Amino acid sequence: ALGYFTLFLFLSAYAPGVMTDTSLAGGLPTGLLLALLQLPVTWLAIALYEHTARRHVDPLADRIRKEAALDARRGAGR
């Protein structure tokens, strides 16, 4: 997603002719099409991030919380 956004910014800054080209999609400027594609790219990035977090980060965080609670109980018993 970051690469896509960087490409969009690069084309906007250094290739305005490409962004204003209307030969694609029935007269819509290429820049508008690329801008509209940012929404699904963002959704995909969020979905992949959530999947990764649930699969790898959440179990690790739960284990750390349990160990911290156990250590706190041990420390309170002294």
Image: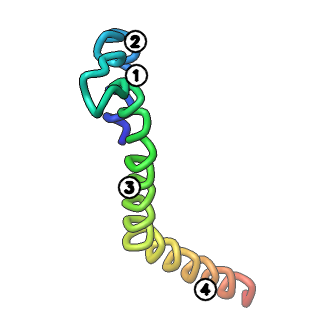
According to the picture, the residue beneath numbered tag 1 turns out to be: 9
**Would residue 63 appear left or right of 4 to someone viewing this image?**
right
Amino acid at dot 1: Leu
According to the picture, the residue beneath numbered tag 4 turns out to be: 70
* Distance between the alpha carbons at the discs numbered 2 and 3: 25 Å
Q: Position of residue 39 (x, y in %)?
A: 45, 46
Amino acid at dot 3: Leu
Q: Position of residue 59 (x, y in %)?
A: 44, 77
According to the picture, the residue beneath numbered tag 2 turns out to be: 13
**Would residue 38 appear left or right of 21 to someone viewing this image?**
right
| Residue at point 60%, 85% (across, down) | 70
* Distance between the alpha carbons at the discs numbered 3 and 4: 38 Å
Which one is in front, 60 or 21? Answer: 21
Quarter holding the C terminus?
bottom right
Q: Which mark is residue 44?
A: 3
Q: Nearer the viewer, mark 4 or mark 1?
A: 1
Amino acid at dot 2: Ala
Amino acid at dot 4: Leu
